[in-house]
Image (cartoon, grey):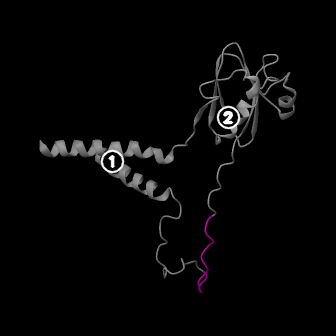
Amino acid sequence: MASHFKMASFKILLLSILLSSTHFFSVNSHEFEVGDDKGWLVPSSKDDDFYDQWASKQRFQVNDTVNFKYKEDSVLVVRGDEYEECHSTHPIFFSNNGDTTFTLDRPDLFYFISGVSGHCERGQKMIIKVLKPPKSPSPPPPPPASQNGTSEPSGHNGAVAKLGAHPITVPLLVMSVIMVAFFREFF
């Protein structure tokens, strides 16, 4: 009976480790509340660049979302020239439902304006710069060829090259070992 309990506990532990290790493979994104507690509204006359100041303090990445909270207003994504004119007849995106979430799906500049007449001119507009993802490290150069034309890792005399060239290698290896142990037990 105690052996059965130990095995069941071990299986639960393995499953817990497996499920908790998925964070190694998840894509991190962040949801930003536009204007923080103020939301999306016409700024005061002395603070007409409020939204651009707010956006410049953030670090937007691909797949982050911006959430606009407003009443009796709208939010449009427009081209740069339409942003300057505070007018668009064919916006890239339009919403007026009071709670709008927009996904920043690429590294670029995104131009937001209010669609209510006069609001953009009074400062209800914003430019968001989405940063390019960091470059992944370039792969190491291939090892030099030996006398017989085959490649051998330098300094290892033909031994297997070390793991760890990529930061995900160790978590992937650990997860694989856990999965093999888990599935052997059940199948």
Which residue position holds label 1?
182
Relative placement, left or right, of 142 versus 181 is right
Residue at disc 2, secondary structure: helix
| Residue type at the position of mark 2 | Trp
- Residue 143 lies in magenta, yes or no? yes
The front one of 165 and 65 is 65
Taking the spot 73% from the left edge, 23% from the top edge, the residue there is: 44
Q: Locate residue 70, reporting x and y percent.
A: 66, 18
* Rendering quarter of residue 173: bottom left
Q: CA distance from mark 2 to mark 1?
A: 48 Å
Quadrant that contains the C terminus? top left
Q: Locate residue 18, reporting x and y percent.
A: 38, 45
Q: Of all residues shown, which one is farthest toward the left?
A: 1
Q: Locate residue 55, reporting x and y percent.
A: 69, 36
Q: Main secondary structure of the magenta part?
A: loop
Which mark is on residue 54? 2
Which mark is on residue 125? none
Relative placement, left or right, of 134 versus 15 is right
Taking the spot 28% from the left edge, 44% from the top edge, the residue there is: 11
Which numbered disc flags the more N-terminal residue, 2 or 1?
A: 2
Labels 2 & 1 near each other (Cβ < 8 A): no
The residues colored magenta run 139-149
| Residue type at the position of mark 1 | Phe
